[in-house]
Amino acid sequence: MPSEPGPKRPQPSTDRPGTLEEILGELRLLRAAVEALTARQQHRAFSETDQALVLAIHETAGSRLFSAAELVDHAQLTTAGGLRDAIASAVGALNARKVGKALRRLEGQELAGLLVVRVGADREGAIWNIARVQE
């Protein structure tokens, strides 16, 4: 009685690396790309208006959590001239969406010893905090 053929061996794919050396070469390329992106992000230059915005937010909010909409609402008060001016300079208008986009761009970056941190989200959007960098 003829024996039944066993399971077929998978054929090597032509679109994936096949040998350990090829895999290691791909890994080295990926690692180099990640390191280049990280270095570029760490050395990104921020404008004086970005720094002024973060400082004004920290001066206003301290360690409290806030949304971009809450910042814009507060900036419209007569006592919040510094925050209002910083927002207008950084994003061009008292607009919560633009403030949120600016905060997203600055997220995780250190400016003047302060760090922009996204801590969550609610019905108004992202919830932010300006934290002092520990040395």
Image (spheres, rainbow, N blue to C red):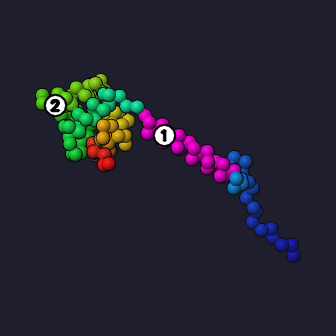
Total number of numbered discs in the rendering: 2
In the image, 52: left or right of 16? left
Between 129 and 48, the residue placed more toward the observer is: 48
The amino acid type of the residue labelled 1 equals Ala
Which element is circle 1 on? helix
Q: Quadrant of residue 109?
A: top left
Q: CA distance from mark 1 to mark 2?
A: 37 Å
Sequence-earlier tag: 1 or 2:
1
Residue placed at 28% from the left, 24% from the top?
Answer: 89
Across and down, in percent, residue 7 comes to: 75, 66
Across and down, in percent, residue 85 comes to: 22, 26
Across and down, in percent, residue 95 comes to: 27, 29
- Residue 97 seen from this side: no
Q: Quadrant of residue 99?
A: top left
Q: Which mark is residue 80?
A: 2
Confirm whether the magenta stretch covers residue 120.
no
Q: Which mark is residue 39?
A: 1
Question: What is the crowding at mark 1: few (fewer than 14 residues within 10 Å), some, or many (at least 20)?
Answer: few
Which span of residues is magenta-colored? Answer: 22-44
Across and down, in percent, residue 84 comes to: 21, 28
The prevailing secondary structure element of the residues shown in magenta is helix
Residue placed at 21% from the left, 45% from the top?
Answer: 64
Label 1 or label 2, whichever lies nearer to me, is 1
124 lies above or below 51: below
